[in-house]
Image: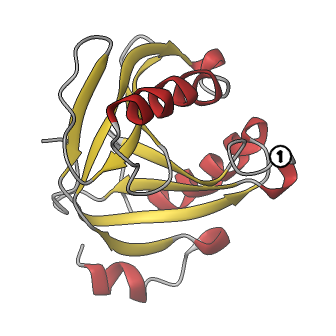
Amino acid sequence: MTEQGLLDAAVAPHDAEVATSQPVSLFGIRSTVKLTALRTYPQDILPVVASALQRLRVPPAGPPFCVLRPRGDGQFDVLAAYPTKRRPRIGQPFTTNRLSGGLVVRTLHHGPWTTLLNTYDQLSEWLTVHHIKQVSLMWEEYLVGPDTTADPTMWQTRIVVPLPGGRSGRR
């Protein structure tokens, strides 16, 4: 379905929107994470990534990300990362990656990460209505999080899912 076709469709629960994402280079740590640990993983790992960037004198080019790739065993391959304008060269456990950009659907979650599943459920409804059955990659952008405010009710997380044929994904 084209971007215009998705925009014309009358169903967009809870502010889901179709947009074009820009390419982004990421620097972070990749791990396999159980579903039950997903909500605490970013809070545990992103400070380590931020510290490494500071030591390398590479400023983040935006808010932190978690790129999530579901696995068949109920776990996720997760890259907890910051966008950067250049790719720092450093060894394990750090890695670089690039999201190529393209057509995505995204929605904004307000509140603590413990309630993210509600927003994922609403986004899943949108995907189902638009006959998008398999999601092989998604990411969360932590626009306002614990690095900005200690009050979880103020946190804002953008959830992004690349649309089939929209080119967005890892390179």
Quadrant in which the C terminus appears = top left
Q: Residue furthest left?
A: 171
Q: Residue at coordinates 74% horizontally, 53% vertically from top-left?
A: 155
| Location of residue 115 with respect to 92 vertically, above or below | below
Q: Residue at coordinates 20% horizontally, 48% vertically from top-left?
A: 86
For disc 1, the marked residue is 152
| Location of residue 25 with respect to 8 vertically, above or below | above
Is residue 128 in sight in this rendering?
A: yes
Instruction: Between residue 15 and residue 144, name the one nearer to us.
Output: 144
Q: Position of residue 60 (x, y in %)?
A: 41, 49
Callout 1 amino acid: Pro
Instruction: Between residue 134 and residue 34, name the one nearer to us.
Output: 34
Q: Position of residue 51 (x, y in %)?
A: 49, 28
Is residue 68 in sight in this rendering?
A: no
Q: Residue at coordinates 45% horizontally, 57% vertically from top-left?
A: 127
Q: Quadrant of residue 61?
A: bottom left
Q: Classify residue 76 as left or right of residue 2.
A: right
Q: Quadrant of residue 112?
A: top right
Please tell me how crowded label 1 is: few (under 14), some (14-19), or many (20+) other residues with Cα within 10 Å.
some
Q: Residue at coordinates 39% horizontally, 53% vertically from top-left?
A: 161
Q: Dot 1 lies on which element?
A: helix
Quadrant in which the N terminus appears = bottom left
Q: Position of residue 93 (x, y in %)?
A: 32, 12
Q: Quadrant of residue 22?
A: bottom left
| Location of residue 88 with respect to 29 vertically, above or below | below
Instruction: Between residue 10 and residue 104, name the one nearer to us.
Output: 104
Q: Classify residue 112 as left or right of residue 39.
A: right
